[in-house]
Amino acid sequence: MTLNTNHRPGFWRHFWQRWVVGGVLGWAAERPPVRASGGWIPIRSLSPRHKPRILKHLLSLDVQDRYLRFGYQATDEQIERYVLGLNFERDEIFGVFNRRLELVAMAHLAYSVDPQWATCAEFGVSVASHQRAKGLGVRLFNHAAMHARNQGVSMLFIHALSENVAMLKIARHAGAKVQRDGSESEAYLTLREATLDSQLSGLMQEQMAELDYQLKNQAQQFREWLATMQEIRQGVRDARHASHKP
């Protein structure tokens, strides 16, 4: 039987609410692990070609932010080695770009290399200081958890400093069990099995984020072209003005 949607104006509205709004913002008809305010935020999977942007983002973190992200006061050289060692084939790295394609937030979902813990993954996140209080950390956590779930991960692990209140708050609100051991804390979140809804939501999120990225890329190229044209025009005006001088 063929589904005819041409004469059903409410079909696409229902589709959007069900698969896009429900999925992207809330794991598709299931209660989200952590609530975040605001509209949809495009979260894109990163690849090796994004390493320069990843490095620029991490190097922009101040001393305290580096300390909370890595658990120690990482130097520029240590951050460079971290970025160089990112394994994009094994792990998943997600990012949020602004309209100028600057990476303003990123998350690292690292899968276990030990076969005994094959269904476990670790989550880490960083957000640029000027992008705080926008829920980007929560959105990246939700996105990473859904992606891990769809990949068969049953346990999401977070290792953070006990003073990293924001990260531990996200973990607790998601239902994670947090164990504190002095200056460090570990959070464990049990993930539900993947469903058709979560799989379709993940696919829709990836497609929409890719479209958003391509549109931003085209806009950036247009701005660069426009700036070049303005420079050329200004050069022509200057040349004409100089030629008319006595």
Image: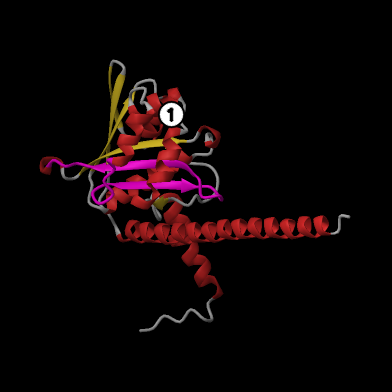
The amino acid beneath tag 1 is Ala
Q: Nearer the viewer, residue 155 or 140?
A: 140
Farthest residue to the right: give it.
246
Q: Nearer the viewer, residue 118 or 174?
A: 118
Farthest residue to the front: give it.
246
With respect to residue 67, does 56 lie above or below? below
Position of residue 9 measured from the top left corner of the image (x, y, whole percent): 56, 74
Q: Residue at x 53, y 42 (%)?
A: 37
Position of residue 73 measured from the top left corner of the image (x, y, whole percent): 37, 22
Position of residue 236 measured from the top left corner of the image (x, y, whole percent): 74, 60
Q: Residue at x 51, y 51 (%)?
A: 40
Task: State the image quarter where residue 29 is shown.
Answer: bottom left
Q: Which of 98 and 119 is in front in this view?
A: 98
With respect to residue 63, does 1 lie above or below? below
Q: Is residue 139 left or right of residue 200?
A: right
Task: Check disc 1 and report its element: helix, strand or loop.
Answer: helix
The N terminus appears in which quarter of the rendering? bottom left
Q: Residue at x 28, y 53 (%)?
A: 150
Farthest residue to the top: give it.
182
The C terminus appears in which quarter of the rendering? bottom right
The residue under label 1 is: 166
Magenta stretch holds residue 94: yes
Q: What range is drawn magenta here?
A: 85-114
